[in-house]
Image (cartoon, helix red, strand yellow):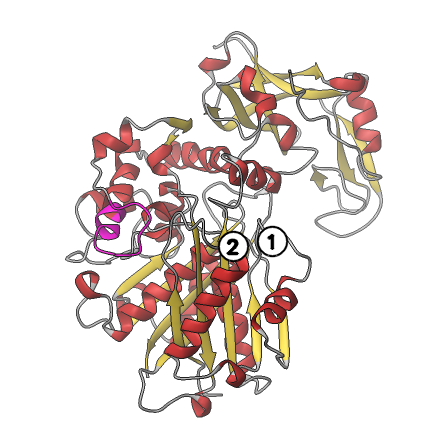
Amino acid sequence: MIVSKPVPLPTTDTAHYWQACDGEELLYQRCGDCGHVQFYPRRSCVSCHGTKMMWAPSMRRGVIHSFTIVHRPPTPSFDEDAPYVIALIDLDEGYRMMMNVVGDDRASSAIGRRVRIVFEERAHGRKIPQAMLEAAP
Amino acid sequence: MPAEALITGAADTPVGKLPEHNCLSMQALAARDAIADAGLAPSDIDGVLAGFSFTQPHLMLASVFCEYMGLKPAFTTAVQSGGATACTAVMLAAALVESGQCRRVLVVTGDNRLTGLPPGGAVALLAQVGHAEFEQPYGISVPAAYALVAHRYMHEYKVVPEDLAAIAVNQRSFAALHPHAHMRKPITIDDVMRSRPIAEPLKLLDCCLVSDGAAAVVVSAPAAADPSRHRIAILGTGQGHTHEHISAAPSLTHFGCEISAQQAFARAGAIPSDIDVAEIYDSFTITLAVELESMGFFKKGEAGPAAAAGELWLTGSLPCNTHGGLLSYGHSGAAGGMFHVVEAVHQLRGQAGPRQVEGSELAFVHGDGGILSAHCSLVLGHV
């Protein structure tokens, strides 16, 4: 029996973000009061605690800040993918996200490698952002 | 300044596979022994702090424990800070006693996450500390999250996996000297390097154990302590917090342990070189390396090489995790951190047998919860 991988459940803070992902658009938040850039989406600003949060579209480019190759998944739904890559990606707009590095060349992941963001479909049509390595310079 | 709170009782159960026990029966055993160790009866206890449990995941575990043991305390609550729970609860117990709210606080922890959960059950449950929307969908596990820290650390400080492996070897050597330890068979650097990859660069022997076990301490006001027994004081405490989820951490190389240690040392009037023995949270080899360096015991990148040079052994500059730590003594959830507290008390009392650091006057204990998220440091010593 194939156990499907987790599908994120949106909250009232993140529904708009996930809806954009389903349309293959990657959004982040910018504070309308102090300009702070933040991720994950929240109702208020992490920096000034104001509530004028604005959505902004990401150019979907970034760099690997760190990564690991997972050999032992925590749950059976990832068994088929093992070993797989988890990375912390610093998006060019100045915020950090966790993603898998996907693609046939994912074993070449390295700290400092540039990536572009693509979308992977999970159950119920939900799409989640993932990273693919840009060609090495 | 109120007189410092004392740790007057300390006890733990054997650690490993204890199929004859459940979470509460082990906690009650450790509690009873810690209370007796303090020269007290259960009816002398007026405060109870309980850690969390995976096999008994009750919303009000402290109340459940008190009911099981037949205690009716004046103050009780559960404490939930992941791996920092034991140190945090001891810090809270000290505050309760120093404020005059309580005279004798029992701090109890324990879990049977080895025999009480199916194989892989603890790992799967622990993976739920990852953010439900922004980490879990990517297959995050606790080892993988620490591996992200390890890779960045190795990149910035030019550390190699063999340096971290020396930490695991050091602690297994200590565990061999402790009758309760879960894993006692000696290992070599080669054994660590060839052990099964979990999340690169971390391999099986870089990772803590999953064990059944329980441990408890009694924290007393000086006026409520037996004057004929050892007086081990909680001289300094501190906490530091920067994040919960690793993807939200402001840094992969600077963590709250920098603050928690600074505060604990300042309150104790001590510096790292004053410490005779250290019991520091070691969920993974990288955890210990990062903490030792962040808290001022070694320079960045140097804890691993120091371990390889024997500095963390009995004859070294900082005997560390002298019971074997989470890596070899055992990890039973909140009790994992409490085993460090109990070992520090045994060292200061001169009760550590073949693991004894001669002339131990000052001990440092540290707990880390989450992914280097919640930190709590203690300085313990004689008064």
Which chain is mark 1 on? B
Label number found at residue B204: none
Q: Are marks 2 and 1 on the same chain?
A: yes
Task: Give the residue displayed 27% in from the left and 63% down from the top.
Answer: B277
User: Does residue B58 belong to the magenta stretch?
Assistant: no
The residue beneath circle 1 is: B56
- Which of the two discs, 2 and 1, labels the residue nearer the N terminus? 2
- Classify B293 as above or below A134: below
Residue at mark 2: B22
Instruction: Say which amino acid is labelled 1.
Output: Gln
On screen, residue B24 above or below B130: below
Q: Residues within 10 Å of mark 2 (few under 14, many from 20)?
A: some
Residue A29 percent coordinates (x, y): 76, 35
Closest to the observer: B152 or B73? Answer: B73
Protein chain holding label 2: B
Identify the magenta region. B171-184
- Magenta stretch, overall SS: loop
Q: Is residue A38 left or right of residue A52?
A: left
Question: Is disc 1 placed on a helix, strand or loop?
Answer: loop
Q: Quadrant of residue B121?
A: top right
Taking B256 as reference, is B330 left or right?
left
Residue B329: x and y in percent read: 33, 51
Give B316 or A45, whichever is nearer the viewer: B316
Amino acid type, label 2: Asn
Give the image location of residue B33, x and y in percent.
Answer: 41, 72
Q: Residues within 10 Å of mark 1 (few under 14, many from 20)?
A: some
Q: At x 70% / y 49%, what residue is drawn?
A: A47
Name the mark nearer the viewer: 2 or 1. 2
